[in-house]
Structure formats: structure tokens, C-alpha cells
Image (cartoon, rainbow, N blue to C red):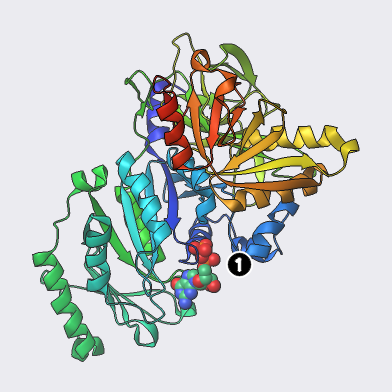
């Protein structure tokens, strides 16, 4: 691929995540998007994953049991001349760390909100991360086929709760059983709501935004009310501003129903107009790498073992930041400086994984990993060394002591722990005094998934003794004296052999600081 071709390819990429509170309809809308992309032929394919019909991988059982999505995956398809990469993010809050890292790998985000519920806690958290990154955010108010809150009220909430300006791309005409259609401000037309099998019908609007010709809707008081509301948001609301959208300061707002596939295509078409192509990625030294830079580079934002339990494989997810990936290419792994040949790669379609030949900046690829990679690793081709910005890390707050139930099965126990820890959802520590295995996580659910996967994938039954909440604080090795360990703290080392204390509570930490005022404790490594 020459530079021109690379540029053209990169310009076609749209890589985004859908963020939402559980049950807002993320899975349903994803599925509709895949339908438009021709990736799935029948509605219900992605959905069925949750109920188990589709579940090829046994460990998704846990999702089924709890009805939550604990894994995130990547789906790729072509639509309207664009190559779309959707990164799925688990909705449950215990998996926020994984989700945060996934958000580092996208160029924009779609926020799906249940229009009866408005902004829920998980949406708010995820929104903050997107805002921090300054990526464009598009809003889809879902479930219009049910009675929800007033559209004006929902838009006001965006500004009040999230502090983002909004611009209505369309406006509902009625809702629930009384849903008549969408007043499509952006396309200057009305999208009529009718039975799905009747296809889509539009009414064109004139320059004043009035229906051209005769239509019963014209006499409808609901329609008159919508005209008034649209007038109001046009005059009192924010102006459409592409610059602000690009900075994540203004969110284009769409209404629709993912379930009945109403307004989803309208959303997708407009979204693709304004969602950004891959942008430059920041490196640790503050410089940026442009996607059209011909030297390949990327970073690993996720590692997942046993996506397919029959193969016992492990996959490192790479966001390509620049250049072109070719199967079999040689790269340098920045952390170790070692050369690697990337011969075993995969891309992600909705339900299959195919061997991947090439990919460009913006794409997500999967590399079969035999233990080379860690989350946050940079890989690059060419002579010029690169290192991308650190991915967000969260200090674990909950801890358990973990042992193998069956002492004869130490081998599978160690193998399982090491692999699952490498995925990054859970942290492993060893106590100084007894060398016990201690696991740390942000939420309780991570321990349960760990236990489940140890049993199912490694045939290793584990015992977990809860240690409760602790405050993890690292200490510089040259300041450490093992005598500092007392009954109020536990001295452990992390996977990089760096020492840290697990304090019982804030009081214990303060007591320690009073006793050793010269010792510097840090919350993160
Ligand atoms: P997720 O947890 O965000 O992935 O949400 P799902 O897509 O699984 O949807 C949660 C529930 O809401 C399911 O029962 C869906 O059928 C339902 N749902 C999703 N979108 C709509 C919609 O537009 N209208 C209605 N009435 N229900 C919906």
C-alpha cells in the first residue's frame, strides 16, 4: 500500500464504542448496526448470546446467569463505504477498568440512553472518561416505542447532569403507542413510524420546516406541538458546531427505538458523517503519531484468554495507531526491546474470526499471544522507537487470599492464575512473610468471574478467603524496612516485585505516616 492508498484507507475507518447503563439497549442497537452492515442476517443473533443459544464459549455462561455482559469484544463491518469497528464495553461497574482501557482505543463514542430513565450512574461514569479524552460523543435516546420522558427534559438533563451541550438532530413526534414519527431536523424531513414490514416512508419539508403538500399529520395537534418544540430548541438551544462536536463539547442527539429499528439507520447515516476518522495518538514523550505515518505502530489495550475454549488460545487486542499491518511483519515490543514476528493474527467479524491479512490505523486486530504481551504494551515497526501513553490503571480496593482446593493440582492453579492476571482484570500480589497468593480487584464480581473461569477453563477449584477493603500504597524499595510491617498493614509485592502495603483503613495509613514521616507512599505504581 502506498502513502496515498494508506491515507484513503485510514480515512474510511470509524472506530467507536457504545456506552450505556445496563439494559438501556446497547446490545439491541449493536445488533441493528450489524444488520445494516450485512454481518448478521437475522435479528436476534447477538442478543441470543445473552440467553445462551449463541454462546460458543462456555465461560460466557456467567453472563447468562447474571444477565450482564462481562466481556468486551470487537465487531467489524463495512457500511456506506466506511469500515466500522465497534468495540463493545461491558456495562457492569465491576468491569469499569476493562471498559476504561477500551475507551482509550476508540475515536468516538455513542451514548445510548433509555428515554424513560434518562442518565443513569454507569452512563455518567463512562461519559466522564470520554470527556476526559475529548472524543466526540453522540447520543441516542432509545426505547421511543415506549412512553418515556419529555424530549426537552432529556436534553436538559444532558446539560445539567453531564455538562455537555446538545444539538437535536431529530425530534420525536409522540412516543409509546402514540409514536407517529421523527421530525428529522438534520435531513429536513419527517420519518413516519409504521409497521416494520411496510418499509420506510419520509415526508419532505419545505424551507420553513413545514410538510410539503397535504398530509393528515398536518392537522394533528401533536405535530403542532413538535413544531413549537423544534422552534424552541432551534432558537434557545446550542447551534450546530462541528468543531465543538469534534472536541466532545457538544453532542448531537438522536431519538429512536433499537428494538423496532426505528430511527437507527437515520442515526447511523448521520453519525458516519460526523464521527471522526482515526486521529493522531499521543506518546509518552508528549509527541504524537499520525495515523498516516507509514511505519506501523499500535498498543495493546486488552488481553483475553480462551475466547474459544476448544483452542485454549489467548488474544491480545491491538489498536493500530499508524501505518499498515501485514501478517508476518516484524515489530519491536517496546517494553522488552525484543523483535517479534506477527504471524498469527485475527480480525473480528460479528460471530466469526478470520485470519487477517492486512489492517490499517484505526483498526483493531487480535494477535494470538503465547505470553509475550502485557496490557499497555506498544509495538512498532521501523527504527524509530515509540511508546504510547500509559493506559489508565485503577488501584484495587478489594482483596482475597486464594489457594488451590486440591493441593495436587498446583500446576493448573498456577497456569490459570498467571494467564488470568495477565488479562488485567485482576491483580496478583504475594505476601512477604508467607508468599501467599493475594488477589486484588476493583469490584467483587471480578473475583467471582475469576473463580468461575479457573474452574471452567483450567479445571482448578479455588478457595478464596475475603480480606475485605484495603488501601494499597506502594513504597520505594530503598525506603522499605520489613519491620515496618505491623498488625495494621500487610506487606506484599506486586507482579513486578515492587513492595506495597495493604492498610486496613485510613487510620492505619495515617498511623504509619506519622510513625515514618520520611517514607513516601503512593497510590499507584
Ligand atoms: P444492554 O444491557 O444495554 O445491552 O441492553 P439490551 O440491548 O440487552 O436491552 C435490554 C432490554 O431492553 C431488552 O429486553 C431489550 O429487548 C429491551 N430493549 C432494547 N431496546 C429497546 C427499545 O428500543 N424498545 C423497547 N421497548 N425495548 C428495548
Q: Where is residue 456 in the image (x, y as percent from the top left)?
A: 79, 49
Name the residue located 44 percent from the left edge and 26 percent from the top edge: 515
Q: How crowded is mark 1: few (under 14 residues within 10 Å), some or many (20 or more)?
A: some
Q: Is 276 positioned to the left or the right of 308 in the image?
A: left
Q: Position of residue 281 (x, y in %)?
A: 37, 28
The answer to whether mark 1 is within 8 Å of ligand 1 is no
Residue holding disc 1? 44
Q: Where is residue 491 in the image (x, y as percent from the top left)?
A: 59, 28
Percent from the top left, x then y, of residue 70? 59, 53
Secondary structure under the numbered disc 1 in the rendered image = loop
Q: Which residue lies furthest to the front in this view?
A: 515
Q: In this view, does 329 lie above or below 163?
A: above
| Res 451 seen here | yes
Image-based side of 92 in relation to 370, left or right? left
- The part of the image, by quadrant, that contains residue 332 is top right
Residue found at the far right of this picture: 408
* Pick the front one: 185 or 152: 152
Q: Which residue is found at the position 59% from the left and 58% from the top?
A: 40
On screen, residue 184 above or below 481: below
State whether residue 392 appears in this view.
no
Is residue 170 toward the left or the right of residue 331 in the image? left
Quick check: 366 above or below 82? above
Please state which of residues 347 and 78 is positioned toward the viewer in this rendering.
347
Asked if residue 204 lies left or right of residue 200, the reply is left
> What residue is at 32 percent from the left and 55 percent from the top?
138
Identify which residue, 209 or 372, lies in the foreground. 372
**Count of numbered labels shown in the rendering:** 1
Amino acid at each position: 500500500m502506498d502513502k496515498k492508498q494508506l491515507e484513503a484507507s485510514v480515512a474510511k475507518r470509524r472506530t467507536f464504542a457504545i456506552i450505556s447503563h445496563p439494559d438501556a439497549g446497547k446490545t439491541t442497537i449493536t445488533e441493528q448496526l450489524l444488520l445494516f452492515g450485512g454481518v448478521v442476517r437475522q435479528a436476534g443473533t447477538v442478543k441470543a448470546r445473552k440467553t445462551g443459544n449463541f454462546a460458543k464459549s462456555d465461560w460466557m455462561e456467567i453472563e447468562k446467569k447474571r444477565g450482564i455482559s462481562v466481556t468486551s469484544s470487537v465487531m467489524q463491518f463495512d457500511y456506506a463505504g466506511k469500515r466500522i469497528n465497534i468495540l463493545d464495553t461491558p456495562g457492569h461497574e465491576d468491569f469499569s477498568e476493562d471498559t476504561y482501557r477500551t475507551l482509550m482505543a476508540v475515536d468516538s463514542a455513542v451514548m445510548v440512553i433509555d428515554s424513560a430513565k434518562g442518565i443513569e450512574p454507569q452512563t455518567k461514569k463512562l461519559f466522564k472518561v470520554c470527556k476526559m479524552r475529548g472524543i466526540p460523543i453522540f447520543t441516542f435516546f432509545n426505547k421511543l416505542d415506549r412512553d418515556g420522558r419529555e424530549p426537552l427534559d432529556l436534553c436538559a438533563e444532558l446539560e445539567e447532569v453531564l455538562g455537555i451541550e446538545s444539538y437535536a438532530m431529530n425530534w420525536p413526534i409522540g412516543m409509546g403507542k402514540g409514536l407517529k414519527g421523527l421530525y428529522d431536523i438534520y435531513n429536513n424531513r419527517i420519518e413516519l413510524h409504521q409497521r416494520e414490514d411496510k418499509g420506510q416512508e419520509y415526508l419532505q419539508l419545505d424551507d420553513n420546516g413545514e410538510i410539503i403538500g397535504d398530509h393528515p399529520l398536518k392537522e394533528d395537534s401533536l405535530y403542532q406541538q413538535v413544531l413549537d418544540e423544534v422552534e424552541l430548541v432551534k432558537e434557545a438551544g446550542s447551534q450546530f458546531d462541528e468543531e465543538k462536536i469534534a472536541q466532545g463539547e457538544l453532542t448531537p442527539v438522536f431519538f429512536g427505538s433499537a428494538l423496532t429499528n426505528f430511527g437507527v439507520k437515520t442515526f447511523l447515516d448521520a453519525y458516519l458523517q460526523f464521527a471522526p476518522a482515526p486521529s493522531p495518538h499521543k506518546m509518552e514523550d508528549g509527541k504524537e503519531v499520525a495515523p498516516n505515518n507509514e511505519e506501523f505502530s499500535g498498543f495493546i489495550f486488552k488481553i483475553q484468554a480462551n475466547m474459544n475454549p476448544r483452542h485454549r488460545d489467548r488474544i491480545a487486542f491491538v489498536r493500530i495507531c499508524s501505518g499498515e499491518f501485514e501478517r508476518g511483519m516484524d515489530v519491536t515490543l517496546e517494553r522488552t526491546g525484543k523483535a517479534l514476528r506477527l504471524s498469527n493474527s485475527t480480525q473480528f467479524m460479528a460471530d466469526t474470526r478470520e485470519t487477517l491479512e492486512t489492517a490499517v490505523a484505526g483498526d483493531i486486530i487480535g494477535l494470538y499471544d503465547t505470553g509475550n504481551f502485557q496490557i499497555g504494551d506498544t509495538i512498532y515497526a521501523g527504527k524509530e522507537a515509540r511508546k504510547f501513553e500509559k493506559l489508565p490503571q485503577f488501584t484495587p480496593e478489594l482483596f482475597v487470599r486464594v489457594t488451590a482446593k486440591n493441593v495436587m493440582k498446583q500446576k493448573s492453579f498456577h497456569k490459570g492464575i498467571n494467564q488470568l492476571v495477565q488479562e488485567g482484570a485482576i491483580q496478583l500480589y504475594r505476601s512477604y512473610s508467607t508468599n501467599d497468593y493475594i488477589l486484588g480487584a476493583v469490584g467483587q464480581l471480578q473475583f467471582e468471574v475469576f473463580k468461575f473461569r479457573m474452574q471452567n477453563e483450567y479445571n482448578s477449584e479455588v478457595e478464596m478467603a475475603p480480606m475485605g477493603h484495603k488501601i494499597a500504597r506502594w513504597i520505594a524499595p530503598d525506603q522499605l524496612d520489613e519491620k515496618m510491617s505491623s498488625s495494621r498493614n500487610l506487606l506484599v509485592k506486586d507482579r513486578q516485585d515492587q513492595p506495597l502495603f495493604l492498610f486496613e483503613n485510613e487510620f492505619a495509613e495515617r498511623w504509619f505516616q506519622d510513625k515514618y514521616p520520611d517514607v513516601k507512599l503512593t497510590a499507584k505504581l
